[in-house]
Amino acid sequence: MFAAAGWAVVGAGATLGVGLLSLRLETGIGEQEPGELMGWSWIERYLLPALGLVGFFMFAARDGFGPSLWIHSIWILVLIQMLGFDLKHRLILDLVTAPSVVLALILSSVSPDLNIWRSLFGLAVGGGALLPFALISSLFHHGQGFGWGDVKLGMVIGAITGMSLNYGSLYTLWALIAGTLIGGVITVVLLATRRLGLRDTVPYGPFLIIGCGVILYFM
């Protein structure tokens, strides 16, 4: 347990570094929306390190120290970066998703419960399942809600978790379902407490990312 606590501290420090990287990346996103956060904010200062602390601790306590922990730690950092950036800017960058897909395919042969075929199948299912929502959003809602970044996020989630036709290995599907359920519950709570209006848009990416993290932990 002490070793896991030490790894948690490493995770908090690593996600501070991820936050600094995100600050560099946000300089290239172009025109900002009114009220959009820019620069060093509570997301980089508190949220990302807290998520890194918890994520690294939980996976270290479960995996022990070995190849699985290193791989899972990489994905925790990637997922946390995307979550923070999407919360702040409602964007998921190709500069993050494209290398993540490639890395997931490279690591698939040494990742728990994965191989290259499961990873490719998950990639196709993850992107394909979200594609219709992005098309509908683009055609009827001016891209508000689901966007093409969410489709690419689905591909990353699929490549990381993998998929097979075995009922016990539908990890990509479970990740998307978990993210949808989490998002639904949180949205209802925000509406009920009037922190969110009926006309407000909600970024779906963070919920999908949380769902992916949950499934990764229980794989």
Image: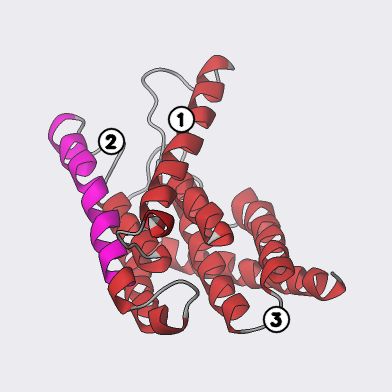
Q: Say which element carries label 3.
A: loop
Disc 3 residue type (three-letter):
Phe
Numbered mark located on residue 112 in the image: none
- Residue 132 is a magenta residue: yes
Amino acid under disc 2: Gln
Q: Of marks 2 and 3, which one's residue comes earlier in the chain? A: 3
Residue extending farthest left: 139
* Distance of label 3 from label 1 (alpha carbons): 35 Å
User: Residue at position x 60%, y 57% from top?
Assistant: 40
Mark closer to the chain start, 3 or 1:
3
Q: Is residue 71 above or below residue 215?
A: below
Q: Mark 1 highlights which residue?
A: 184
Residue position marked by numbered label 3 in the rendering: 65
How far is mark 1 from mark 2, CA to CA? 17 Å
**Residue marked by disc 2:** 144
Q: Is residue 152 placed above or below 178 in the rendered structure?
A: below
